[in-house]
Image: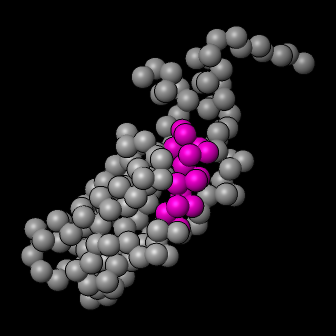
Amino acid sequence: MTVLVLDSPELLASATLAEGFQPDSCAESNKPRQLKFHYGYNKHQLSAADMDMLTRHGHYLRRNVHLHVCVHGHSDAFGTADYGHFLSRLRASAVVRFLIEEGIEEQRLKAVGWGSDRPLATRADHAANRRVELEYVQHSVSSALSG
């Protein structure tokens, strides 16, 4: 049996990633499952239930500092496209502000407003399309070392 000992952090990080090790695999079971938050017509304020769930996301993110979140805001097809993009950015920004208040560093969060360009359901299902979605993004150990 041959044993390879790596004493270089860069080589160790590359070998670890090549083996498929996921730094947050142990904590994955604690990750909040709700990633979509829906809104009423022409609304961008968070409900109490949304704030409770986002607080859980905040706890998870504080324990998993290698994770970043892209917050995707969406709107229904009512009104002009410009207003839909504006409203979707308001929704995404409200979530980002809340997570910052929960202690998450601003550089780990990104807000994107899609308007009605990416419907979840049919364009006619307006309620389903008025939403924010959280996308967790893991930055690899190797990119952290090089950057």
Tell me the quarter of the image containing the C terminus. Answer: top left
- Residue located farthest toward the right when viewing the structure as drawn: 1
Residue at the spot x=17%, y=72% of the render?
84
Residue 122 appears in the rendering: no
Q: Position of residue 34 (x, y in %)?
A: 53, 69
From the image, give the main secondary structure of the stretch colored magenta.
helix
Quarter of the rendering containing residue 113: bottom left
Vertical side of 83 occupied by 99: above or below? above
15, 40: nearer the viewer? 40
Residue at the spot x=46%, y=20% of the render?
146
Does the magenta portion include 58? Answer: yes
Residue at the spot x=77%, y=13% of the render?
5
92, 139: nearer the viewer? 92
- Residue located farthest toward the bottom when viewing the structure as drawn: 124
Residue 13 appears in the rendering: yes
Tell me the quarter of the image containing the N terminus. Answer: top right
Q: Where is residue 133 in the image (x, y as percent from the top left)?
A: 40, 65
Quarter of the rendering containing residue 8: top right
Does the magenta portion include 41? Answer: no
The magenta segment is 53-67
